[in-house]
Amino acid sequence: MSTIRTLPRQAGVARQHPVNILTYHHFASADAAGTRQLGITTHPGRFAAQLDYLAATYNVIPLDRLISGELPARPLLITIDDAYRSVFEIAAPMLAQRRLPAVLFVNPRPVSEAFVPVDHVICLLGGPRAEGVVRDAIGEVAGRDAATAAAANPNALGPGLREAVKQRLIAKLGTTETALHRDLELFLTSDQIRQLPGLGVEVANHTTSHTLCRTLSAGERHDEIAGAKDAIEALTGRRVRAFAFPWGQSGDATPAVLDVVRASGHQATFLMHGLDNAKRPAPDIWYRSLVTSETPAGLQIALRLKPRLRRAWRGLPALPTAPTG
């Protein structure tokens, strides 16, 4: 990595050198049945080419530099979401080889127990082709009106209803969640999580079970955010300093949710929206851009052109002014 050139701390620095933040998820040469419908997989060869391009073009920073505000020219933060084993097996060694830092936003529940997020179950049922099956399961659990409102998306339900829907879907697969967790071989182990910081990957918070935060009650907000932070710190033995919203939608950043995020000690919070952080909704909130297997040229477009077009076309996404639940 090239030498980091620190900018003086003065007004306007963040506007002159906005931080680009990338988000990856899963790494594999070919998708398995449990991820094929999600569109989140990065090919290892393409990831290597991307890292070489980023190391030559940007100053890749650790989370420390983002939180402190002591930013170099052309700063870029690499982040990864969810609890995929491929982060340890594929991504982390490639990052370590190039001495590039990254942040993993992890859900501790698939790591600590036989828990499978509902999206993987839907993938196994056929993804979009399973919409009728999913809608029927939502109707059985929450009623026909809820099935219509949820648009066949169990994630739009609160955690309790979502889990009940998931169990019905797993039953349609003719298996159990324990067997599914074992057979998918998708998720990190506790030992792998503990090794990631030594490879330059800081572990941070992505909720306990990968949930839409707008659906949470007060007690659920504590369990999914503060409880997840405690669980991750117990797994790694290190302090958790950052939180990323699953799916990264600004509608989840309600005042009640942000109160829990901040009160539990998170110093940086992340949305998606594919913006470059030239403007941000609060000093501790940052935007990220989703990438998968783009070429280096495609990555250049994703980092330099698309954020400007989105900002010009849509402006800054508004945060909710009152809790939704």
Image: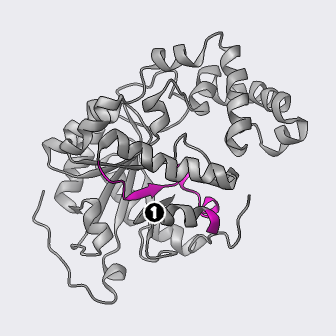
Residue at screen point 34% across, 68% down: 19
Q: Secondary structure at mark 1?
A: strand
Counting from the top left corner in percent of width and height, residue 252 is at: 62, 59
Residue at left offset 78%, top offset 27%:
137
Foreground: 240 or 169? 240
The picture quadrant where one finds residue 88 is top left
Q: How is the image coloured?
A: one colour
Please state the extent of the stretch shown in magenta in the rendering. Answer: 238-256
| 325 part of magenta stretch | no
Pointer 1: residues within 10 angstroms few (<14), some, or many (20+)? many
Q: Residue at x 59, y 57 (%)?
A: 249
Residue 203 placed where, x, y %?
34, 47
Q: Is residue 44 visible?
A: no
Question: Residue 231: which quarter of the image?
Answer: top left
Please name the amino acid that badge 1 sits on. Thr
Residue furthest toward the top? Answer: 174
Q: Where's residue 100, x and y in %? A: 19, 51
> Which residue is at 42% across, 62% downward?
266
Quadrant in the picture for the N terminus: bottom left
Give above or below for 307 relative to 222: below
State the image coordinates of residue 74 (x, y, percent, origin top left): 25, 69
On screen, residue 156 versus residue 176, left or right, reads: right
Question: For this view, does 110 lie left or right of residue 199?
Answer: right
Furthest residue in direction left, as rendered: 3
Give the residue at mark 1: 269
- Let me know if residue 132 appears in the view: yes
Q: Is residue 163 above or below residue 172?
A: below
